[in-house]
Amino acid sequence: MLETLQALSAQAMPDLETQSLTYSYGPIFITIAFALIVATAVFSLATFLGPKNPTPEKLIPYESGSEATGGRHVKLSVKFYLTALLFVVFDVEAVFLYPWAVLYQSLGWMGLVEMLVFLAMLTVALVYCVKKGALEWET
């Protein structure tokens, strides 16, 4: 009787070495499927059951709460892209500086040199953007 119970429990809980891919990733797939079902249901309910009252005022395109002016085919200024570049550069800097500061003592001199090279590259990017006038705004 005891041997039968041990055999059944061994079948119910497989060893870690013999787990199948479905057994390992099953909960993740179930979570993703559940999230997709809920998102689809909420979107569908809002689309089909939500109020629809398109007035001419609501159909006017707007930008930041004000009426859009100018042509849609006009290209953005280079300063816009330089400002976006600055944002990305310093966002990446913040992402890399915090873990480096936490592990500073264990990284030693090599970690310090690598971070100084990284900061030098960020400085070059900042100087480039300043020389191109990315931080000067017209009123």
Image: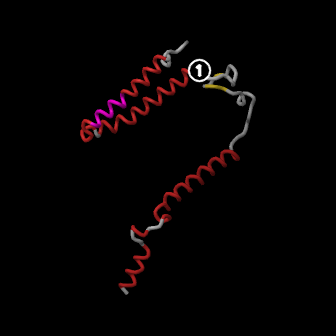
Q: Which residue is mark 1?
A: 77
Point out residue 31 in the picture as x, y percentages from the top left corner: 52, 56
Point out residue 26 in the picture as x, y percentages from the top left corner: 50, 62
Q: Left of 14 or right of it: where is 83?
A: right
Which residue is located at x 25 percent, y 41 percent? Answer: 106
Q: Left of 42 or right of it: where is 85?
A: left
Please say if 107 is above or below 15.
above
Please say if 56 is above or below 51.
above
Q: Residue furthest top?
A: 139
Which residue is located at x 62 percent, y 50 percent? Answer: 40
In front here: 121 or 51? 121
Q: Residues within 10 Å of mark 1 (few under 14, many from 20)?
A: few
In front here: 13 or 51? 13
Rendered-image quadrant of the C terminus: top right
Rendered-image quadrant of the N terminus: bottom left
Q: Which residues are magenta?
A: 110-119
Which residue is located at x 70 percent, y 47 percent? Answer: 48
In front here: 98 or 121? 121
Which residue is located at x 47 percent, y 21 percent? Answer: 129
Residue type (three-letter) at the residue carrying disc 1: Ser
Q: Quadrant of residue 110?
A: top left
Q: Residue furthest bottom?
A: 1
Q: Is residue 23 magenta?
A: no
In front here: 54 or 92? 92
Type of secondary structure dominating the magenta stretch: helix
